[in-house]
Image (cartoon, rainbow, N blue to C red):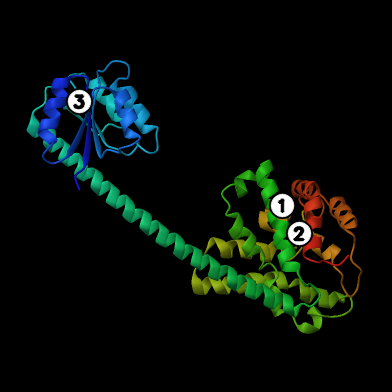
């Protein structure tokens, strides 16, 4: 199929010479003005445009700008036809996106060779672009498959932990939902923007489901004790934070490091640290606690407060909010606690949707 060439020039002689030079190899459409070109281009898309610069009403530069700002026409290669020899004209043309200049008066062989060359270049670019798009789509599909597999494994592992701890039904999904609410609002408000602006929110929330994975190492006797834990038992229970880090480090040693596993390790190891340094397992204080741990601390404690335990009745949503806000600046990062207070009604909706007891 012949390629279509537009020749736009206000001189009949130039139009005739260009058509004569190109007609045996291409379908040539000649136009005496850019205005006419824009009328025709809505119906016929050319493969290349030969465009005069010095024309009345709409000159070549203005016409080129209009072409390049229209997504449907921006990729059409344009060659300027000009009698100008000023270097500044060439600089301006190339800056606007013209692919070449042909000086008038032009010879038929020069015109034919230039057109042929740029059509071949354009074809190679389009083929390469298509190949890159296909490759990108394949990689994206593979990434989505791996992400789906990863999420599936996370759900299964988190479910195994939760099924062992019969006291915390729904805890994993509720805390993930709380976490997403907090993170989205923090992003909107610019809170800790330097730390979370480049964060993959979906990846971060998914990794948070592993924050209690260390409970796999805690015996059922302690994990499902129907009464309040003794001091010694509580010391053992507290080891689940470090045990979780150890488990994730074992995964890293076998599969290699990843952002997902880094997030999971931070959630696992630091969600029981306190802003005042009185938490565990490391006794870190303030911003020395990784942000993941500081955010999860609020989500985790809120869910524990509103959930029933063998040794306590559930607190109401309002009571839980009051307890958390009273601990702002002590147990919790005050900035994140303020965000929690702002979105407290959304936490209540999650609690109701996931069936936490009240």
Marks 2,1: beta carbons within 8 A: yes
Figure quadrant of residue 211: bottom right
Cα distance in 3D space between marks 2 and 1: 9 Å
Cα distance in 3D space between marks 3 and 2: 67 Å
Vertical order, 2 against 324 (above or below): above
Q: Which mark is residue 64?
A: none
Q: Secondary structure at mark 1?
A: helix
For the point 77% across and 49% down, which residue is it? 343
* Depth order, front residue of 10/93: 10
For the point 84% across and 80% down, which residue is it? 225
Q: Which mark is residue 182?
A: 1
Residue 46 x/y as whole percent: 27, 38
Residue under label 2: 299
For the point 77% across and 57% down, which residue is it? 298
Give the quarter of the figure containing the C terminus: bottom right
Vertical order, 348 against 12 (above or below): below
């Amino acid at each position: 199929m012949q390629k279509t060439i537009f020749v736009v020039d206000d001189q009949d002689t130039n139009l005739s010479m260009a058509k004569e030079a190109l007609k045996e190899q291409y379908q040539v459409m000649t136009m005496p003005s850019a205005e006419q070109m824009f009328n025709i281009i809505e119906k016929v898309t050319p493969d290349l445009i030969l465009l005069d610069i010095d024309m009345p009403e709409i000159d070549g530069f203005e016409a080129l700008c209009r072409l390049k700002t229209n997504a449907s026409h921006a990729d059409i290669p344009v060659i300027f036809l000009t009698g100008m020899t000023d270097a500044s004209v060439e600089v301006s043309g190339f800056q606007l996106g013209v692919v070449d200049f042909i000086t008038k008066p032009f010879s038929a062989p020069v015109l034919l060779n230039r057109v042929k060359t740029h059509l071949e270049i354009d074809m190679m670019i389009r083929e390469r672009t298509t190949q890159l798009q296909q490759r990108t789509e394949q990689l994206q599909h593979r990434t989505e498959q791996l992400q789906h597999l990863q999420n599936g494994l996370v759900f299964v592992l988190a479910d195994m932990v939760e099924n062992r701890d019969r006291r915390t039904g729904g805890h994993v999904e509720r805390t993930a939902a709380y976490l997403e609410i907090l993170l989205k609002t923090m992003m909107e408000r610019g809170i800790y923007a330097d730390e979370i602006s480049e964060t993959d929110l979906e990846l971060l929330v998914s990794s948070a489901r592993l924050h209690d994975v260390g409970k796999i190492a805690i015996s059922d006797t302690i994990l499902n004790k129907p009464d309040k834990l003794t001091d010694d038992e509580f010391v053992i229970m507290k080891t689940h934070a470090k045990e979780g880090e150890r488990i994730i480090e074992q995964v890293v040693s076998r599969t290699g490091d990843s952002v997902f596993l880094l997030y999971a390790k931070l959630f696992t190891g630091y969600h029981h640290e306190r802003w005042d340094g009185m938490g565990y397992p490391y006794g870190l204080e303030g911003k020395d606690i990784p942000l993941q741990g500081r955010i999860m601390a609020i989500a985790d404690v809120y869910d524990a407060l509103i959930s029933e335990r063998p040794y306590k009745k559930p607190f109401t949503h309002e009571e839980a909010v009051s307890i958390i806000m009273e601990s702002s600046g002590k147990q919790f990062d005050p900035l994140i606690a303020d965000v929690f207070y702002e979105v407290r009604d959304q936490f209540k909706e999650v609690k109701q949707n996931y069936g936490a007891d009240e």
